[in-house]
Amino acid sequence: MRIRLLGPVELEVAGGGLATLAGAQRRAVLALPALRLGRVVTMDQFCELLWGERSPASARAAVQGHVAALRKVLADTPFELHTRAGGYLLSGPAEEVDALRFTALAERAGERADRGDGAGAIALLEEALQLWRGEALADLPDTPLRAATVEHLKQSSTAALLRWAGLRLRQGTGAAAVAVLEQSVRRDGLREELVALLVRCLQQAGRTADALNAYHRARLRLDRELGIRPGPALRAAFAEVLADDRPEAPPAAPAAVPAEAPAAAPPAARSGYQAPQQLPRQRGELIGRTAEAQWLDRACAPDRASDGPALVVGPAGIGKSALVTAWAHRAAERFPDGRLYADLRGLDPAGPAEPGAVLGRFLRALGVPDDAVPTDPADRAALYREHTRGRRLLVVLDDAADADQLTDLLPDGPGCAVVITARGSLEKLVATEDAALLRLTALPEADALGLLEHLLTPGRLRAEPEAGAELVRLCEQLPLALRIAAARLTAHPSWTPTDLVAELADERTRLAALELDAHTGLRQQLRLSLHQVSAQAVELLALLALHPGREVDGQAAAALLGTDTATAHRALGELASHHLLTGAARGRYHRSDLVRLFSADLLAEQSAPSEQRREHALLRLLDHYRGALQHCGSYLDPGQEDPGAPALPPQPLPPVVDIRTALDWFRAEEPAVRMLIDRAAVSHPDRAWRLALTTGSLYYGASRFTDWLARADVGLAAAERCADPVAVAFLHNCRAQALVALERRHESAEAARKGVAAAESAEGPAADSARVRSLATLGLVTAMLGDPTEARRLAAEATALAVESGNRERLVDALVHQGWVSLATGDPAGAERRSREARELLPPRPVTQVHLWSLLTEAQALPPTVREETADLAWHRLLAACEEAGLLYLHAVAEQSYAAHLVARGRAPEVRARLASALERFRRHDRLAGHRSELTAGLESSLSLRTP
């Protein structure tokens, strides 16, 4: 192993020696990206590992210093530490990192074991476990993140050990595992599954007395330190020892904790008992769900970690009942005392099943005569627990309404297994009953296609593979939707999959196409979920039809509802807990296309008086995004156009703190913003042009130049529809800026002239601002087109008009543009002066894109007489700020400009690395911008010429 993390952190270099990793912090900076090989580790994550919650002001510089030192020691290894936006990424062979090799070996062992190759699995697990040299990450700073990472690795090690010992036990070689298990139990004697395996392996080795002693030591420790009794896995191991060796009495237990009595005889052996067989019939073959069935095997195994129920939850049509029913039939023989089943009707409009009635049916199935079944529900629950204690039963509780419905239906015996299905998450059961939770998701694409092929005649899909794949996509890989689609194709033999795809592709008819009758369809299943959520959550689900994005956050939801964000988050949480929405990033929720179409149905069903409420909700949403865009855009361009305050009271603004977080918010919301602008251009043009205008600086910062121009075009058309000359002027200038970014300079100049003309046709402060903006843009593009005299005149006119207006933001904008024009037309001193004046008019925090462009112009304008150390400081300060901000285009331009500075200073050996860095960023920028930049082509040519 080149990088060793399963013990003290070590790095092996060429020749087999160990590199010197000075200090715990440097070892930590190596360890974290090694554990996350191939993924970016952010600066915040490094700081959290090195210093915990309180990192010093010099933290970033310290991490950068450690990275620089590590790059030198990694030079003789197959690993390379790359700089990425916001952090660093380590690349290299995963098999050379012991922690990653351990994981890979454990996974391969699991595959071998699943195929029945126990010997092969044992060999792989032994190789994996031998990689450990002590506690993982033993010599890193003691921080919460280090502790959490070590605990995760420890859990993986214990899981591998448990699997290895279990395989040894099944192969009859449990004696070979005793020494390792004893050592592990000494370290972690409260982990019952370890003790249970040790007890079984000792018994298999013929050491019955030692097995019983191990059990009693664990029982005493559990009682003394945790105040609990042994769980089902440990009790089951103890019972097996007693059953295999009855003549040998267990060692006497101390008086303080009485010894447990041997287990009672299995109820199936009692006279007159007939095991209940209540499982419903299996409806067809289960296709796919192999991993989920294996999860149920583990969650219901005799040696499972706890005796809590197995909880299978998921959205409508996902196949929860089908999975559990199929698995229960397959696993039936493991439960010789019978299988109990109840449909709890959690989604029934008539109301859920009463627990008392279900208990009555269960008791009768367990052999209790009718006249002995108590009438009181509490007495029934007590009798049910008595009759399940000591039995090996499977209890399936299908379609539960909530956790309270289930409390009395859980059996008491550790040999019993309970499987529950529910539309809601029932997270209370995880907390109160130690339930194991499985969230069922859509079928993988291959399994979804396999289900369709199974349901249709052979070859029907193979004749149209593209139509089959599209059918799977439109059904969102939901088993219910796929079964309905297959049923419709079966009922209409003349239809082809392409015919049904055409029907489903129309969003207006998609849900109707996924219905068989008035009671069977995806829409009906979604409607049943509404019975379990509040009226406010139902209202939000309907109003989400007005939101065009796939994701929504609490602030947009609050705008739709007209409430505070806390209320909106509760409604979103309700919808997510019943799987009508899915949690995405923190505070954000995703919805599927089918749920989006269902929302539109709900909204359409609302009566005429609700039309005004819908209109108000839409206006609140538009104004929310306008306020949010203005707020985020101010971190890039503090002098952006002010289209006026929103008409409706604003909601809380996005929690952004700098350029990077502002762009993160915009990237997440851009699809919704784009569609809102396009829709509002027809119905609410006065709001559409304002929205389009406020996106400009954000599209620029996100390198989305083509999308920027498209929104500017829509905004201009909306402004012209409103016959507002100031709005028209602002949008012409917005187009001009987007066009010059796309290097369409002649078109940009024409748009800027139109902006000037429109602004001159109006009066007032807003018209003056529009004129300053348009003149500044026209001056910049005129310089690019090669007319320095006219460019300087236009830039000076814009600055003079800004000074006259007394508008500080306009003056900053005019000075930044005049500084660039001065640089482009051969006046570096004027460029440096005007850029510095612009920057000094801004507050030092937050750092905006305008600050950084000014710093770039100042660096480009540095005279050759400036000391090299001073110049380097200016350039490095700029480049670090660009990386911190995540401004891809500006960073690329700065890297290229720094390379030109190095050439001028005669530092040729450093140039190629800077040009390569600039080219990599320009290429990424071009992909986002939808345009191949002239700068990219020039750099590629330049680097090609420099290739030896």
Image (cartoon, helix red, strand yellow):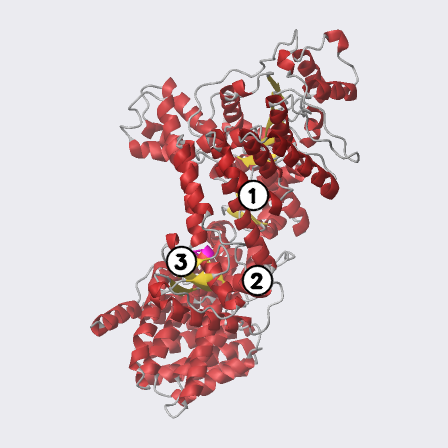
- SS label for mark 1: helix
Q: Which residue is mark 3?
A: 707
Q: Which residue is mark 2?
A: 48
Q: Say above or below: 429 vs 930.
A: above
User: Which range is magenta?
Assistant: 35-39
- SS label for mark 3: helix
Q: Say above or below: 53 vs 215.
A: below
Instruction: Answer with left or right where residue 531 lies relative to residue 132.
Output: right
Q: Residues within 10 Å of mark 1 (few under 14, many from 20)?
A: many
Give the Cα separation between the discs numbered 2 and 1.
37 Å
Q: Which residue is mark 1?
A: 544
As for residue 38 lying within the magenta part, the answer is yes
Residue 479, position in %: x, y? Answer: 45, 28
Camera-nearest residue between 863 and 96: 96
Of the image marks 2 and 1, the number of the one nearer the N terminus: 2
Instruction: Answer with left or right where residue 85 lies relative to residue 424.
Output: left
Q: Say above or below: 282 vs 527.
A: above
Three-letter code, disc 2: Glu
- The quarter of the image holding the C terminus is bottom left
Camera-nearest residue between 800 and 482: 482
Of the image marks 3 and 1, the number of the one nearer the N terminus: 1
